[in-house]
Image (spheres, rainbow, N blue to C red):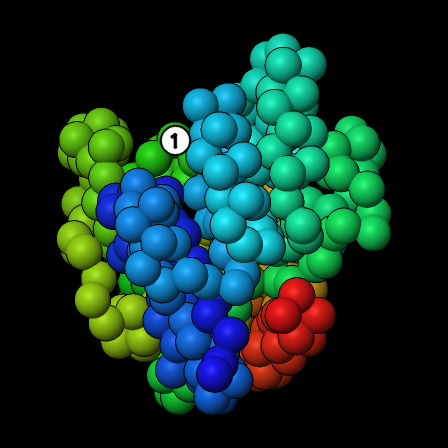
């Protein structure tokens, strides 16, 4: 009988349609399903799932909280527990936690109740160790990934003369993602020079549309069901997040061979090498300058940048599977 691995997600909101769900869907379709039986469920149904499925390992994807400590304590009585930490990071703490003593105390308690702590970037691990939130022997770094074949198949887009340079951005419309910063930056360019297409939705949608109301070169395209198709028509991708423990959007853009401008935060900093530009987070002026830098690049240099990004992403999914296979074998 295959060991049962239960992935618990914190609710049925964006987590079920965003990067986490895409990764778990990819995991269930991988060769690991021949070794392990995967179950994905909301954390709110954990008791029912555990009583009926009796998993061997529980992987918690929900954000840790004071309120959730009791639930976490109950989980560890039923199976081995892994916390997959893709919510909190140095950038998150800088923007959201004015008094860190209480916050760090909660994380120490939560991490203390799990058998293993999986971080999605080396920077996240370093932040945890620096603040003594968990011992080094409990932490495993597994950068986030997903099945990216459809992104790797995105064809190169030639730079067209006398046509607007198309910037793409997509994700949840929230303060974290920094789309307000991007809109402010793009408003500095002539309408004939750049076109920004923003995909997604969320609580900040009305505010963002009001911010872009007088800018005909900024278009909101709504929910994107076919992300590779969206990326096909982009000349570059911008990820202006205020914090981002990892950033699957960056992985997808790399795999699609798109030059990237990203904020120098958390996991984004680790993903961008010589195929993109890193900017100071929360700074529209720095973003405007970076966009202009891309505009000034010759077409062949842009193409080379995209190809290097694609090459960097090719092994991300096999590596992700291999790392999880090793960890789950240790746990079962």
Which residue is rendered at x = 67% and y = 20% of the image? 105
Closer to the camera in the image, 179 or 77 = 77
Residue drawn at x 58%, y 51% as measured from the top left: 81
Name the spot of residue 93 as percent of width and height, x first. Answer: 60, 27
Expressed as whole percent of the image width and height from the top left, the position of residue 329 reads 66, 75
| Image coords of residue 124 (percent x, y) | 68, 45
Q: Position of residue 64 (x, y in %)?
A: 51, 34
Residue 147 seen anywhere in this rendered image of the structure = no
Residue at the image point whose x is 29% and y is 69% from the top: 227
Q: Nearer the viewer, residue 193 or 105?
A: 105
Residue at the extreme top = 99
262 on left or right of 42: right
At x 74% / y 52%, what residue is drawn?
139
What residue sits right under mark 1 in the picture?
Answer: 175
Q: Is residue 51 visible?
A: yes
Q: Residues within 10 Å of mark 1 (few under 14, many from 20)?
A: some
**313 over 90 or under it: above or below:** below
Q: Count every numbered label the image shows and give the total.
A: 1
- Left or right side of 130 for 273: left
Quarter residue 263 falls in: top right
Identify the element where label 1 is drawn. helix
Q: Quadrant of the C terminus?
A: bottom right
């Amino acid at each position: 009988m295959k060991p049962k691995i239960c992935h618990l997600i914190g609710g049925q909101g964006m987590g079920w349609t965003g990067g986490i769900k895409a990764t778990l869907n990819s995991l269930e379709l991988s060769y690991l399903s021949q070794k392990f039986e995967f179950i994905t469920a909301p954390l709110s149904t954990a008791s029912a799932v555990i009583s009926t499925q009796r998993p061997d390992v529980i992987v918690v994807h929900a954000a840790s909280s004071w309120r959730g400590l009791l639930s976490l304590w109950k989980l560890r009585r039923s199976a081995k527990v892994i916390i997959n930490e893709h919510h909190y990071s140095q950038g998150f703490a800088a923007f959201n936690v004015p008094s860190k003593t209480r916050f760090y105390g909660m994380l120490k308690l939560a991490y203390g109740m799990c058998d293993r702590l999986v971080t999605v970037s080396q920077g996240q691990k370093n932040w945890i160790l620096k603040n003594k939130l968990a011992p080094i022997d409990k932490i495993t770094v597994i950068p986030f990934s997903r099945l990216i074949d459809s992104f790797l198949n995105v064809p190169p887009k030639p730079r067209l003369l006398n046509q607007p340079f198309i910037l793409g951005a997509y994700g949840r419309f929230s303060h974290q993602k920094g789309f307000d910063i991007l809109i402010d930056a793009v408003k500095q360019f002539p309408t004939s020079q750049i076109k920004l297409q923003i995909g997604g939705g969320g609580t900040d949608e009305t505010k963002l549309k009001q911010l872009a109301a007088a800018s005909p070169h900024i278009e909101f395209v709504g929910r994107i069901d076919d992300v590779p198709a969206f990326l096909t028509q982009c000349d570059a991708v911008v990820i202006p997040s205020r914090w981002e423990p990892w950033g699957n959007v960056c992985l997808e853009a790399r795999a699609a061979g798109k030059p990237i401008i990203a904020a120098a935060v958390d996991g984004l900093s680790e993903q961008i090498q010589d195929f993109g530009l890193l900017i100071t987070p929360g700074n529209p002026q720095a973003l405007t300058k970076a966009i202009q830098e891309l505009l000034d690049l010759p077409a062949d240099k842009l193409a080379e940048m995209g190809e290097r990004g694609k090459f960097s992403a090719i092994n991300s999914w096999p590596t992700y599977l291999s790392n999880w296979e090793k960890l789950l074998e240790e746990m079962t």
